[in-house]
Image (cartoon, helix red, strand yellow):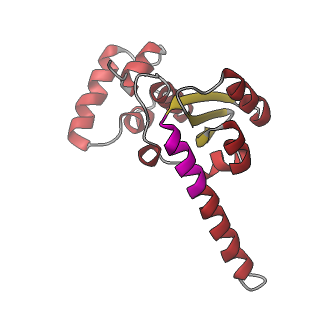
Amino acid sequence: MHTPFIGEILQEMGLLTRIQVEEILAHQQVTRQKFGQIAVRWGLVNTQQVWEAWARQMTSGRQFVKVNEVGIDTAAVERVTVPTARSLGVVPLRLWGDQLVVAVPPDVSPKALCDLAEVTGCRVHACATFPEAIHYHLDHLEEELRTDCSRLESLPAGV
């Protein structure tokens, strides 16, 4: 199955025309910039709309995402703490406004996603990943947070 491109999604959302998508793609071939960056710079969409399209792309359910390629942002981890993420079996990936993207195992329970939405106050977008990736990334996040706290505690006062 075909994973939709950002331009296709923005067009489906009624934000871009087919001609605008083609013009951006032509510019993209020359500049190697990301589609969304060009669309925003040209004033055709805003960053919130690009994030929404990205979330739709990630959660299209047609492929598994690789968390290490997508990355994890700090804002998402601050909203969904590691203990909460572990209890619900999710990895927080991105947060913008009240939109949250999380990686989940393919058999995630709908209740877990509802609980997450309630706890965070966010609209949750779930994309599938392998269960072992969830455990690996949560363990890695926990270790990173522990290391960061240790560094902060060892700094002299006022630094």
Number of labels in the image equals 0
Q: Is residue 147 left or right of residue 42?
A: right
> What's the residue at 58%, 35% (across, down)?
101
Q: Quadrant of the C terminus?
A: bottom right
Tell me where residue 128 appears, x and y as whole percent. 50, 30
Tell me where residue 151 appears, x and y as whole percent. 66, 76
Depth check, front residue: 150 or 24: 150
Depth check, front residue: 30 or 114: 114
Task: Give the quadrant of residue 7.
Answer: top left
Q: Is residue 36 left or right of residue 137?
A: left
> What's the residue at 32%, 20% (across, down)?
2
Depth check, front residue: 37 or 100: 100
Tell me where residue 8 appears, x and y as whole percent. 37, 19
Specify the segment rendered in magenta: 129-140
Tell me where residue 77 appears, x and y as whole percent. 65, 49
Task: Tell whether position 21 is magenta.
Answer: no
Depth check, front residue: 29 or 53: 53
Please say if 127 is above or below 143: above
Task: Tell whether position 139 is magenta.
Answer: yes
> What's the residue at 69%, 37% (across, down)?
88
What type of secondary structure mainly makes up the magenta span? Answer: helix
> What's the residue at 78%, 35% (across, down)?
119
Q: Quadrant of the N terminus?
A: top left
Q: Is residue 14 left or right of residue 79?
A: left
